[in-house]
Amino acid sequence: MQFSPDIGTDAVLKAFVNDLSRNCYFDYTHTDDRYPHLETYIYAIQTEIMQNKTGYPPNENFDVRITGTSNMTSSLAAYAFVAKGHYYDLSENATDSKPKIVD
């Protein structure tokens, strides 16, 4: 996503995330300065968006059952969810359920 060049590190970015089918908020995390004369502000999704409904009550509207995921249940009621890459920030209660790659 691209935003106005006037955005500073204290801004909270608001955007509709199509993959999650909801509005999300992003907070500044750090500045990427790998390229000379170019500073890129890095924003991450607010942790509340991916908490279960007991940790963040407004998520009850989205039926978030496991912290670190978001509900993607289809209209045919097939339960599905999305998570951050490699299940980053997944609830400790669900980590035993993650698939493991065995050589």
Image (cartoon, helix red, strand yellow):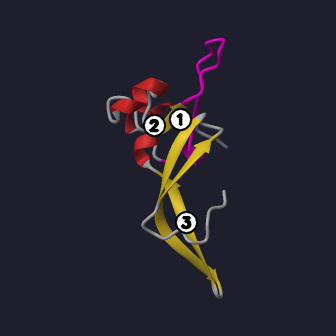
Residue 37 image position (x, y, % from top left): 64, 87
Compare residues 3 and 31 and report the one nearer the observer. Answer: 3
Q: Is residue 75 above or below residue 97?
A: above
Q: Are marks 1 and 2 in contact (CB under 8 Å)?
A: yes
Picture quadrant of residue 54: top left
Q: Which residues are magenta?
A: 71-88
Q: Secondary structure at mark 2?
A: helix
Identify the mark nearer the N-term, 3 or 1: 3
Question: Is residue 21 rendered magenta in the image?
Answer: no
- 87 part of magenta stretch: yes
Residue beneath the point at 46% across and 28% down: 64
Residue bearing mark 1: 98
Q: Mark number for residue 42?
A: 3
Residue that numbered label 2 is attached to: 95
Three-letter amino acid code of the residue under disc 1? Lys
Using the numbered discs, state the Cα–Cα distance from disc 3 to disc 2 in whole angstroms.
27 Å
Q: Are marks 3 and 1 in contact (CB under 8 Å)?
A: no
